[in-house]
Image: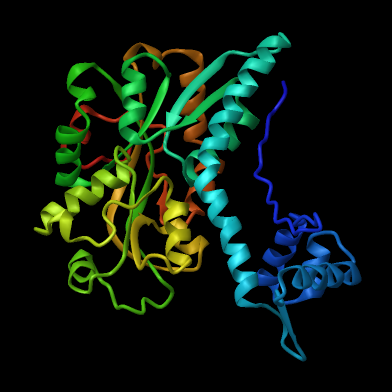
Amino acid sequence: MLEVNIKPVWLFRTESGQDFDLQLLNLLREIHATGKLTHASTRVGLSYRHAWNMIARWSDFFGNPLVRMEKGRGAKLTLLGEKLLWAEERIQARLAPQFKNLCSELELEINRALNESKQVLRIRASHGYAIAKLVEHMSRCIDIQLDLQYLGSREALQSLERRECDLAGFHIPESLLGKEAIERFYPEFHRRPMTTIHFVTRRQGLILAKNNPLKLNGFQDITQKNARYINRQHGSGTRMLFELLLEHHGIQKETINGYQQEEFTHDAVAAFVASGMADAGLGIEAAARHFNLDFIPLAREHYMLACRPEAVDTPYIRDLLILLKTPSFREAINNIPGYAAPLAGVLAKPGELFGEQPTQP
């Protein structure tokens, strides 16, 4: 089986034809993490002298220093160095789902041409930390080829309804908000019988600039202080939660500065806030922690997996349910900030999607 990986390439070019070296970004990232050029160069596999020369060369290229060396204090990125690193993070956050979708399509077609295809499990789910852990564990433990496409919750369930996938991921907030979300945003459950599987829980809340300089504590503060907001795309579970929270707080969406501006992943929202281009966005705690931002929890969600009822007894779904219940998978999820997996792999009772609280098996 061949695996396809696609990565973006940066090209800054001068009139003389000199190109930007992507390896510099790896070095800048490690300097930011360690505060030491010696440690950073070792981590990226460069000699100290080579690393120093690379920084000097590209500082000349931009006409501004990228790193400041302070005696006794190590190395620190300049504003330009931080902006380059942030830009790379934003590119990854924005493009990662599209690249993953394309890779999945290419892998299937290439392996079919090589006559090396295995049984395919088609998953449609939103891009995120938990689904990445699931893919990682499945690739090690289940002999099956994954066709993973990143879609918003509503699109994923529509895909399942059209029989274009085997599993669809979707999110519902706890308690009465979850009942309202199902009734308003997920009509698929009223048209077709579906079996739902507990996957993980996660905390959603406001992602804010470090130290919360505007002292924002909720959506009322965002409107009153005219804070700049970055939204999620229509059809995503987070966008649905946002709409519900606005209504429950009696806030008109037109009063949100930035309501029409959208990003497609939690990391992209966090990167947008980290850049200073927005003051707040709704997202998961893990994304806020990844970008060293503040986070105010507002709701807890159940991330569920849906399949057709007849699929539950198929070998690949049975293997998946066993995997979700393993200590190693649950531990991996519990180590992600704001995530937990107390019921992973347990079939949900029908009432649990309409306001009833799930119970431990």
106 shown above or below 35: above
Q: Quadrant of the N terminus?
A: top right
Name the foreground residue: 216 vs 202: 216
Quarter of the image for residue 3 reads top right
Residue at point 51% right, 28% down? 148
327 shown above or below 101: below
Residue at point 53% right, 55% down? 90
Residue at point 27% right, 73% down? 216
- Position of residue 279 measured from the top left corner of the image (x, y, whole percent): 35, 68
Quarter of the image for residue 228 reads bottom left
**Is residue 331 visible in this depiction of the protein?**
no
In this rendering, would 21 be left or right of 357?
right
Residue at point 48% right, 59% down? 271
144 shown above or below 140: above
Of all residues, the one furthest to the bottom in this rendering is 71
- Position of residue 132 measured from the top left corner of the image (x, y, whole percent): 53, 40
Instruction: Give the tally of numbered discs.
Output: 0
Quarter of the image for residue 82 reads bottom right
Of all residues, the one furthest to the front in this rendering is 15
Q: Quadrant of the C terminus?
A: top left
In this rendering, would 227 be left or right of 168?
left
- Position of residue 129 measured from the top left corner of the image (x, y, whole percent): 49, 46
**Is residue 54 visible in this depiction of the protein?**
yes
Q: How is the image coloured?
A: rainbow
Name the foreground residue: 227 vs 331: 227
